[in-house]
Image (spheres, helix red, strand yellow):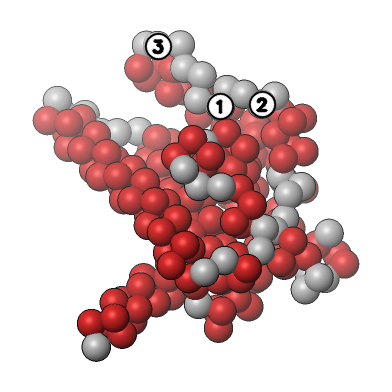
């Protein structure tokens, strides 16, 4: 019985994440989806391996055991939750000094968390296969935003500059890739979804 309840709780977490991400992308401008695509691919290229999440698990999550997928899902969820907590702490600290955290910093933190959730949803296609069509639609929406990448990357570089000015420090938030390498990284699409994509999106 307890195993069934635990599985139901896991399914609920995955369902809610997929539902929220899909709704957000359906109501977002292409340039925002392009920024989230870029952030998601930056994480895949530069960060996820360092926190113990193997890149190949995203390529075809249905080939992995549910228990393995949930283990990696939990790692990503913990990272997202920690980021949310840090955002709340930063807001409160700024308020204590009679200031407000700039909107660009709040928006960037939320977009960064959404980028993590893209990979959580991708794992969710293997955890809850009945939601794989929703995950495919999520990928279609951000993958089709690749045409906005030059503008999306410009905005991300501007955020990097503004963050440096705000903190009075040299900030290298997106080290490791120049813009062309970043754009090339955004060509990645989990192979599980490739065959179900329309020609216009590839």
Question: For the view shown, which residue lies furthest in the right direction?
Answer: 199
Q: Nearer the viewer, mark 2 or mark 3?
A: 2
> Upstream in the sequence, badge 3 or badge 1?
3
Q: Nearer the viewer, mark 3 or mark 1?
A: 1
**Label 3 Cα neighbours within 10 Å, binned few <14 / some 14-19 / many ≥20:** few
Identify residue for label 1: 174
Helix, strand or loop for disc 3 = loop
Q: Are marks 1 and 2 in contact (CB under 8 Å)?
A: yes
* Position in image of residue 50 (x %, y %): 49, 35
* Position in image of residue 88 (x %, y %): 23, 43
Disc on res. 169: 3
- Quadrant of the drawing holding the C terminus: bottom right
- Tell me where residue 15 sits by quadrant: bottom left
**Label 1 Cα neighbours within 10 Å, binned few <14 / some 14-19 / many ≥20:** some
Question: For the view shown, which residue lies furthest in the bottom direction?
Answer: 1
Residue at 29% x, 33% y: name it: 101
> Upstream in the sequence, badge 2 or badge 3?
3
Mark-to-mark CA distance, 1 and 2: 7 Å
Question: For the view shown, which residue lies furthest in the left direction?
Answer: 96
Q: Nearer the viewer, residue 115 or 160?
A: 115
Helix, strand or loop for disc 1 = loop
Disc on res. 33: none
Residue at 53% x, 63% y: name it: 123
Q: Does residue 182 sit above or below 44 in this rendering?
A: above
Identify residue for label 2: 177
* Position in image of residue 73 (x %, y %): 43, 59
Residue 37 visible in the snapshot:
yes
Q: Does residue 19 sit above or below 162 in this rendering?
A: below
Helix, strand or loop for disc 2 = loop
């Amino acid at each position: 019985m307890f195993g069934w309840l635990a599985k139901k709780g896991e399914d609920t977490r995955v369902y809610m994440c997929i539902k929220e991400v899909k709704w957000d992308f359906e109501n977002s401008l292409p340039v925002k989806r392009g920024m989230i695509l870029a952030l998601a691919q930056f994480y895949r290229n530069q960060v996820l391996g360092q926190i113990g999440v193997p890149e190949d698990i995203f390529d075809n999550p249905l080939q992995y055991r549910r228990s393995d997928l949930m283990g990696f899902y939990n790692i990503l969820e913990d990272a997202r939750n920690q980021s949310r907590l840090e955002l709340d702490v930063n807001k409160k600290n700024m308020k204590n000094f009679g200031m407000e955290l700039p909107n660009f910093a709040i928006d960037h933190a939320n977009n960064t968390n959404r980028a993590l959730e893209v990979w959580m949803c991708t794992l969710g296609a293997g955890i809850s296969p009945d939601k794989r069509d929703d995950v495919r639609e999520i990928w279609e929406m951000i993958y089709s935003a690749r045409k906005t990448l030059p503008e999306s990357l410009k905005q991300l570089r501007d955020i990097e500059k503004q963050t440096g000015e705000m903190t009075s420090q040299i900030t290298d938030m997106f080290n490791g890739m120049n813009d062309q390498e970043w754009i090339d990284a955004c060509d990645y699409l989990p192979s599980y979804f490739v065959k179900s994509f329309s020609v216009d999106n590839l």
